[in-house]
Image (spheres, grey):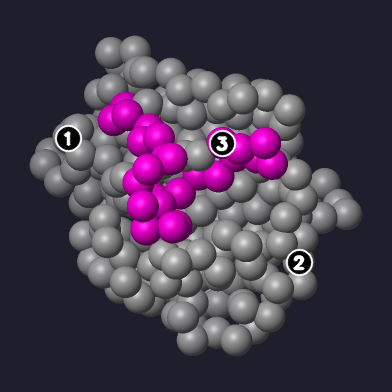
Amino acid sequence: MCRFLAYLGEPVLLNELVCAPTHSLVHQSLHASEAKTETNGDGFGIGWYGEHAEPGLYRDICPAWSDENLVNLCRQVRARTFFAHVRAATGTATTRANCHPFAHGRHLFMHNGQIGGYHRIKRRLEALIPDELYDTRRGSTDSEALFLLALANGLDTDPVAAMEATCATVRGLMQEARITEAFRFTAVLTDGESLTAFRWACDGRPPSLYYRESERGLTVVSEPIDGCKEGWTIVPKGGTLRASRGHRATVSLPRAERAAA
């Protein structure tokens, strides 16, 4: 499983959260403590919002712990919203196009989890993505396919409803194919001004997700970056966290149909 970090708030240097803390995301790329695998070395990516509505991206297949360019970039870039992700591949190639986060227009998306038996439903799932969105697909991951299908389902206007519909579609395809492996969906989405994080799984075992709020802003992580759970709040299983600039985050528990997604 992958590890990630998201931030929304006052502008800060990326280094303060991505590289500098004791258990930073760079440290987690080699020594994750709450993931199925300790090492997340199949590439990394950062996405941030600067002078434009559309985010900037820097992704590579190098392990985050060995990329000097990542450290130098994080020391120089200050952003009000940014994502960072270190990848542990789950069956698809280690390529730059498969590294998170994924961008489309003003949106960024990253995912920690997987669609069980994805290879058995991949063609049918991709066939549901409209041509104009499918033409932007560059990689082969289930995560990017989920993002594009959610965009088709109205993510721009109602991200929670769009993700519910997308996850329900995936579960339907899995059931038709008689796939018994789990579908786990811990993910974060932003348009630069608002942020939505999901912690869903069909087997009740979604990957970990925490958040912390301060006067400066909101930080969402796979696992605490200071190595201490004190001061962090865990998003409950099946929960959805929503936040927007200038407002405190709220967490909603699932309706019954969402819990089964």
**Residue type, mark 1 in image:** Asp
Query: Magenta span covers which residues?
Result: 213-238
Residue drawn at 82 percent across, 55 percent down: 50
Q: Nearer the viewer, residue 65 or 233?
A: 233
Camera-side mark, 3 or 2: 3
Residue under label 1, please give it.
Answer: 203
> What is the secondary structure assignment of the residue under circle 1?
loop
Residue labelled with disc 2? 77
Q: Secondary structure at mark 2?
A: loop
Q: Position of residue 222 (x, y in %)?
A: 39, 50
Which of the two discs, 1 and 2, labels the residue nearer the N terminus? 2
Q: Going by the picture, which residue comes out furthest to the right?
A: 51
Observer-nearest of 141 and 58: 58
Q: Earlier in the sequence, mark 3 or mark 2?
A: 2
Q: Mark 1, residues whose alpha carbon is within 10 Å: few (<14), some, or many (≥20)?
A: few
Question: Dot 2 surroundings within 10 Å: few (below 14), some, or many (20 or more)?
Answer: some
Q: How many marks?
A: 3
The alpha-carbon separation of the residues under discs 1 and 2 comes to 39 Å
Q: Position of residue 79 (x, y in %)?
A: 75, 55
Mark 3 surroundings: few (<14), some (14-19) or many (≥20) residues within 10 A: some
Q: Is residue 77 left or right of residue 164?
A: right
**Residue 125 sits above or below residue 165 on the image:** below
Q: Which mark is residue 213?
A: 3
As shown in the figure, which amino acid type bears the numbered disc 2?
Val
Disc 3 marks a residue whose amino acid type is: Glu
> Residue at 48% across / 29% down in the picture?
241
Dominant secondary structure (helix, strand or loop) of the stretch shown in magenta: loop
Q: Position of residue 49 (x, y in %)?
A: 76, 52
Label 3 to label 2: alpha-carbon separation: 21 Å
Q: Does residue 44 appear in the picture of this structure? A: yes
Q: Earlier in the sequence, mark 3 or mark 1?
A: 1
